[in-house]
């Protein structure tokens, strides 16, 4: 795990994967990041995970190829597992109680609304909402980039 400068990780956060956390990052209370020892979360600068969101870097596929759940089940009998990094590019933000699935990349400046379910990559500077998440609006970037530049980024 690596953590940049000016990062805040609140109480009751559980990160059970590898993590690379950039500068000026905030991870709010009750966030969970799962995916085991080979899972990975990468958060760029000025990114945020709001309260209660779930980042899933590894999960059973649930397609009936084997038994689901416990690592106590011998590997030969387990379902297929998808393990892929979740990446938040600079300025990406995730709202409260949203769920991000394995392998998703949130593009620079994209925002995921509260309670959204994201199973596909996002486009830059776009706001996503819904289940599954869909683009709903563009997001300004000029002022954010100006403020980041004044901090040396």
Image (tube, grey):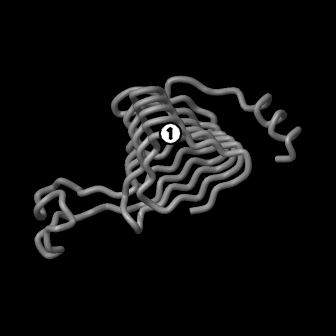
Disc 1, SS: loop
Where is the N terminus found, in terms of image quarters?
bottom right
Q: Residue at x 45, y 26 (%)?
A: 114
Extreme residue toward the front, this view: 11
Q: Which residue is mark 1?
A: 11
Residue 119, x across and y down, in percent? 38, 44
Q: Residue at x 44, y 60 (%)?
A: 17
Q: Is residue 36 above or below residue 34?
A: below
Q: Residues within 10 Å of mark 1 (few under 14, many from 20)?
A: few
Name the residue nearer the viewer: 98 or 36. Answer: 36
Q: Residue at x 82, y 33 (%)?
A: 147
Residue 75, x across and y down, in percent? 18, 74
Residue 12, x across and y down, in percent? 45, 41
Would you say 97 lies left or right of 24 here?
left
Residue 63, x across and y down, in percent? 15, 55
Would you say 92 lies left or right of 104 here?
right
Q: How many badges with numbers are in the image?
A: 1
Q: Residue at x 61, y 53 (%)?
A: 21
Name the residue nearer the viewer: 153 or 138. Answer: 153
Residue 38 location, quadrant: bottom left
Residue 47 location, quadrant: top right
């Amino acid at each position: 795990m690596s953590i940049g400068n000016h990062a805040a990780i609140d109480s009751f956060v559980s990160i059970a994967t590898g993590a690379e956390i950039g500068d000026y990052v905030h991870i709010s209370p009750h966030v969970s990041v799962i995916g085991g020892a080979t899972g990975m979360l990468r958060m760029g600068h000025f990114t945020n995970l709001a309260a209660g969101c779930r980042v899933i870097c590894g999960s059973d596929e649930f397609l009936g190829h084997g038994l689901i759940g416990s690592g106590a089940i011998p590997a030969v009998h387990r379902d297929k597992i998808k393990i892929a990094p979740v990446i938040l590019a600079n300025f990406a933000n995730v709202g409260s109680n949203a769920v991000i699935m394995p392998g998703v990349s949130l593009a620079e400046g994209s925002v995921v609304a509260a309670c959204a379910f994201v199973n596909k990559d996002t486009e830059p500077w776009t706001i996503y909402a819904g289940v599954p998440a869909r683009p709903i609006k563009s997001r300004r970037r000029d002022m954010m980039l100006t403020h980041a530049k004044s901090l040396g980024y």
